[in-house]
């Protein structure tokens, strides 16, 4: 590729030199007599150039595609992704055919019907039959594509299966935070953005017992293979967008409006490593909605593993309440007993809680009703 | 900016040696109410902005193509945006991308293209003395000028210009604490856009009124050149959609400055929870794209209209399917309003809505396809003269097809999940909108230059300019499809953070950058040719392209009022090229059928008795109305 760049640069430079040298000559003629032969030679050259452009263009397209396709993403690791991959390449096939035909006609006609002295163009202002044909054919092809695409879309966007594993993914400048529903109740607790602070970075509301066992991770998102996973997505500050390229998953993270996307990962990270022959391979999650300075590096790793290792990993994670027992002060009296399990054996006195005390009255109520569509 | 105005003045000086009432220098060249002068003001401003806009893109292409390059040599221009190690600041990268998009879409391809050619061609082609209101027209330009100044100034702020992408989605754009690009730069962006919208509305009202009210005798809508049809529909689109952008911008201003919560809800930023609840960032996106999608056609339709004219003239053939062309433009104009949410498939919008918008979006592809086929058929069995304008028009058709086809993939919501906000989208819209419209603009300049300045541009330089640009643009944007298919997200400062982008395509990115710089360099041939020809170009004949439309019946340097005597009447459509039986291969619109018995079609002979009526028609001549 370096050579190609070098080669092209040389060609460009050559052309530029040509331009400059011609410029001088051309400029001299500028005020000369009107050149009646203008239509003669230059016209033939331009006509021929269209043909040459067509040939080189076609070769270039085919060659560059073959070259670039080495680096396309591998086949999707999710069933819905394979379905859209298929539709993508199907559509791509159809538009490629249209691309070649129409561009070829355009350039060939340009060449073929260039000016000849004495010839007269045909007066051919319309042909209703022809026009009807080329309105209807694209319409039919389009209808076909739309219909297949629509069915895929409908299925992808359908409600997640009831047994889907729920994980919450929260975007902030500039990283993702995964929140798990916890191993004991497997239920995400309520949250409230006003409860966010340095340690409680997703704003977990500990007045909801479901949140006692919730744990978070900012470096890795682990999910089980072959099991529907429902990502509940939200954003803390500005728009972000969850993008899992190998899963063909993308969904915006919107402050104030939780979104969701469910999918099944059916190849573990290890399987992919073997399949690609690359022991360093790892799934990744990126951000695709501009969110500021660090937008280009909002990475979190995605690890797909079999259910057993996944459960094991989950069990190893400490609930947030365990890591920061001071939040116990927010637990209502009647639930304290239930929470004891997650707290160090002897509960200490309530630590100071100044950062959130003031905000709590306002937000606490709306939390439980923050529901997903 | 002062120099720009200065230029305009000197340029315009070449023409108009006789005029009705003597005007002062200021009234004649600066605060002129003459549509031709205003058109030139728009054109020069557009060229100025395109140089700025493309220069910005060259800077960020350097960063993308050569991430390790020391950019210290840009220090004199960018100052502290280049750090000690010669690296570009990521915040400023976003500012560059944002300003590039804003400038190219609004200031170059909307104001520079529509502003120039709607102004210049509508009165000349419909046979009017001037725009319906010269004063509003002048006001329109000066609002645009003001918007330009505000936007230009914002480039030099210490915190930089706006930087949230040209779509300025809140909350990022609403919260100054979210990044530098949301501070003063964003305020100026909004003010500038508000002024710009006012300018567009004033212009649009004028275009529409002129087309409806000031057509000359005999110029029915079914005899209007496709250019005028395109300008007319464009103005309608703008008039309906720009106010929506204005309201979006106003609400954003309220959110930024007055503590409202239209777009803000449940935000924790900079260590504190904001009080705003109940707003929706998605609302902004709906409002923005309600303008945004029509806007892409506001940019493209005038280019398509001019191309129709140029292709017919230079293929020496009637445009194929004149009525179908009008119908498809109307179809596009209508459908353009009901497809906006295809930019929002993965925002969390109700999937059912997504389905609806997918269907509507793919319907719009049908009239687009019809137009492409009609262009190709117009070439078929023509007798083509490759003037530079013709070359650029053929190039436009190629870009329109190549870029439009990928729209079919993006319009399919299931496929858009993966491709949204990747380089695939960048490739799509740069080909179909950016390159195609830019080619329309260039084609228009080459074609109507003789009418604007009374001189010819140099053909040979035009050919060279075309081929270098045509090849260059394909080299820049075609590879972006591949990068997009590989999943590369757009608006990334660098691709080093992810395994899936880390070690691949860096040579492709360098290649694209080299091609971009090369293409930019080639544009100086045009600039040189343009400036040189204004002063030293070969003197133009009255009708250099042997064209049918009315502007070529006006004097070589049309004065105030365009035609010295009566405005010509119109008897036929604009596309009587190579009519069987006719002695020339063109018959201008102002030639009555009674003078061309040898070439008349049967139904046209029946129109001869009506010519008297046309001539007797009440003339919409502004000069004959009490001032
Ligand atoms: C054949 C008809 C077309 C279809 C079906 C189509 C479809 C689409 C879709 C679905 C998107 C959104 C992609 C995404 O963000 O994921 C898009 C983006 C875009 N299209 Fe088209 N398009 C068509 C023609 C055009 C034309 C004619 C223009 C301009 C004149 C245009 C300009 C744009 C622009 C500017 C964007 C990107 C805006 C942005 O995100 O910054 N498209 N197109
Ligand atoms: Cu981001
Ligand atoms: Cu659109």
Image: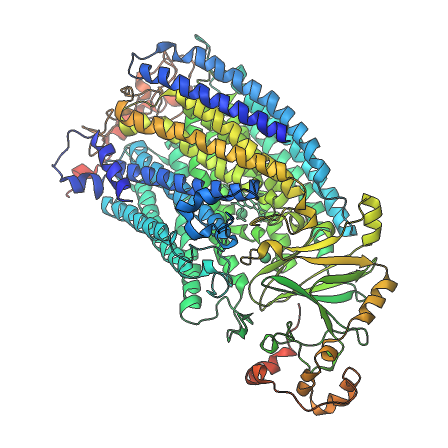
Furthest toward the left, the residue is B22
Image quadrant where one finds the C terminus of chain B = top left
Ligand 1 lies in which image quarter? Answer: top right
**In the figure, is residue B485 to the left or right of B301?**
right
Residue at the (72%, 77%) spot, across then down: A323
**How many discs appear?**
0
Image quadrant in which you'd find residue A200: bottom right
Q: How is the image coloured?
A: rainbow
Furthest toward the right, the residue is A308
Residue at the (77%, 82%) spot, across then down: A342
Vertical side of B480 occupied by B419: above or below: below
Residue B123: where, in percent of width, then height? 29, 36
Residue at the (62%, 76%) spot, across then down: A192
Residue B313 visible in the shown view: no
Residue B530: where, in percent of width, then height? 34, 28
Residue at the (46%, 10%) spot, across then down: A116
Residue B38: where, in percent of width, then height? 27, 40
Residue A352: where, in percent of width, then height? 61, 87
Image quadrant where one finds the N terminus of chain B = top left
Furthest toward the top, the residue is A118
**In the figure, is residue B24 to the left or right of A335?**
left
Vertical side of A257 occupied by B560: above or below: above
Residue B220 visible in the shown view: yes
Vertical side of B537 occupied by B515: above or below: below
**In the figure, is residue B31 to the left or right of B499?**
left
């Amino acid at each position: 590729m370096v050579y190609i760049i070098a080669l092209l640069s040389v060609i460009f430079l050559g052309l530029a030199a040509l331009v400059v040298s011609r410029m001088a000559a051309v400029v001299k003629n500028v005020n000369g007599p009107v050149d009646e032969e203008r239509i003669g030679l230059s016209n033939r050259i331009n006509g021929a150039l269209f043909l040459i452009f067509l040939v080189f263009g076609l070769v270039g397209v085919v060659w560059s595609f073959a070259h670039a396709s080495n680096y396309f993403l591998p086949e999707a690791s999710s069933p819905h992704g394979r379905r859209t991959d298929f539709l993508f390449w199907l559509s791509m096939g159809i538009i490629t055919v249209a691309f070649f035909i129409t561009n070829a006609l355009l350039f060939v006609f340009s060449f073929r019907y260039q000016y000849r002295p004495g010839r007269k163009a045909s007066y051919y202002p319309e042909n209703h039959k022809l026009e009807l044909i080329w309105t209807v054919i694209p319409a039919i092809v389009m209808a076909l594509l739309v219909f297949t695409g629509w069915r895929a879309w409908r299925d992808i966007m359908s409600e997640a299966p009831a047994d889907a594993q729920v994980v919450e993914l929260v975007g902030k400048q500039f990283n993702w935070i995964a929140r798990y529903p916890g191993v004991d109740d497997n239920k995400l607790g309520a949250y409230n953005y006003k409860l966010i602070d340095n340690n409680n970075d997703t704003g977990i509301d500990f007045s909801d017992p479901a949140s006692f066992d919730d744990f978070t991770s900012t470096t890795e998102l682990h999910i089980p293979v072959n099991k529907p996973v429902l990502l509940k997505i939200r954003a803390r500050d500005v728009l972000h967008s969850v993008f899992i390229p190998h899963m063909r998953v993308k969904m915006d993270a919107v402050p104030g409006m939780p979104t969701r996307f469910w999918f099944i990962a059916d190849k573990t990270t290890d399987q992919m490593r073997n399949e690609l022959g690359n022991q360093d391979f790892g799934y990744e999650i990126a951000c695709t909605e501009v969110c500021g300075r660090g937008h280009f590096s909002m990475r979190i790793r995605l690890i797909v593993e079999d259910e057993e290792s996944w459960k094991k990993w989950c069990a190893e994670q400490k609930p947030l309440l365990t890591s920061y027992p001071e939040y116990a002060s927010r637990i209502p009296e009647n639930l304290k007993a239930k929470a004891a399990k997650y707290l160090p054996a002897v509960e200490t006195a309530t630590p100071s809680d100044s950062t959130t005390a003031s905000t709590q009255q306002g937000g606490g109520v709306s939390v439980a009703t923050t529901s997903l569509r | 900016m002062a120099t720009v105005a200065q230029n305009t003045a000197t340029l315009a000086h070449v023409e108009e040696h006789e005029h009705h009432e003597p005007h002062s220098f200021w009234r004649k060249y600066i605060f002129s109410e003459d549509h031709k002068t205003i058109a030139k003001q728009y054109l020069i401003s557009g060229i100025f902005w395109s140089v700025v806009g493309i220069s910005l893109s060259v800077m960020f292409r350097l960063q993308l193509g050569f991430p390790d390059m020391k950019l210290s040599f840009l220090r004199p221009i960018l100052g502290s945006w280049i750090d000690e190690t010669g690296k570009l600041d990521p915040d400023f990268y976003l500012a560059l991308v944002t300003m590039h998009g804003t400038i190219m879409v609004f200031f170059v391809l909307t104001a520079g293209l529509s502003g120039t050619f709607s102004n210049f061609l509508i009165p000349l082609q419909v046979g009017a003395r001037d725009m319906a209101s010269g004063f509003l027209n002048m006001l329109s330009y000066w609002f645009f000028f003001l918007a330009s100044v505000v936007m230009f100034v914002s480039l030099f702020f210490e915190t930089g210009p706006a930087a949230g992408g040209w779509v300025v989605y809140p909350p990022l754009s609403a919260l100054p604490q979210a990044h530098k690009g949301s501070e003063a730069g964003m305020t100026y962006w909004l003010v500038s856009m508000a002024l710009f919208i006012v300018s567009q509305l004033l212009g649009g009202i004028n275009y529409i009124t002129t087309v409806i009210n000031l057509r000359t005798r005999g110029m029915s809508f079914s005899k209007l050149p496709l250019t005028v049809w395109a300008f007319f529909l464009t103005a309608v689109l703008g008039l309906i959609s720009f106010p929506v952008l204005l309201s979006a911008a106003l609400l954003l201003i309220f959110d930024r400055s007055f503590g409202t919560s239209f777009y803000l809800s449940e935000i924790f930023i900079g260590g504190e929870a904001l009080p705003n609840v109940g707003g929706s960032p998605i609302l902004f996106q709906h409002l923005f794209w309600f303008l945004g999608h029509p806007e892409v056609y506001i940019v493209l339709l005038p280019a398509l209209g001019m191309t129709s004219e140029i292709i017919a003239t230079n293929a020496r053939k009637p445009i194929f399917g004149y009525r179908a062309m009008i119908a498809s433009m109307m179809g596009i104009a209508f459908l353009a309003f009901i497809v906006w949410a295809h930019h929002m498939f993965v925002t969390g919008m109700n999937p059912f809505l997504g389905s609806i918008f997918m269907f509507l979006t793919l319907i719009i592809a049908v009239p687009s396809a019809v137009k492409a086929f009609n262009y190709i058929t117009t070439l078929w069995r023509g007798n083509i003269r490759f003037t530079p304008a013709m070359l650029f028009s053929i190039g436009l058709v190629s870009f329109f097809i190549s870029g439009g086809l990928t729209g079919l993939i993006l319009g399919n919501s299931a496929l858009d999940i993966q491709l949204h906000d990747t380089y695939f989208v960048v490739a799509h819209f740069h080909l179909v909108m950016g390159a195609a419209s830019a080619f329309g603009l260039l084609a228009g300049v080459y074609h109507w230059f003789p009418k604007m300045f009374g001189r010819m541009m140099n053909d040979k330089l035009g050919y060279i300019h075309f081929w270098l640009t045509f090849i260059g643009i394909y080299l820049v944007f075609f590879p972006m499809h591949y990068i997009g298919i590989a999943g590369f997200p757009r608006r990334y400062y660098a691709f080093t953070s992810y395994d899936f982008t880390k070690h691949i395509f860096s040579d492709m990115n360098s290649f694209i950058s080299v091609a971009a710089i090369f293409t930019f360099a080639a544009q100086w041939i045009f600039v040189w040719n343009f400036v040189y020809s204004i002063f030293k170009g070969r003197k133009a004949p009255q009708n250099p392209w042997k064209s049918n439309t009315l502007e070529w019946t006006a004097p070589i340097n049309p004065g105030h009022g365009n035609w010295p005597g009566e405005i010509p009447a119109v008897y036929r459509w604009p596309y009587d090229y190579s009519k069987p039986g006719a002695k020339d291969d063109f018959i201008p619109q102002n030639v009555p059928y009674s003078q061309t018995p040898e070439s008349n079609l049967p139904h046209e002979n029946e129109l001869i008795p009506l010519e008297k009526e046309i001539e007797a028609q009440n003339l919409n001549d502004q000069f004959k109305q009490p001032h």
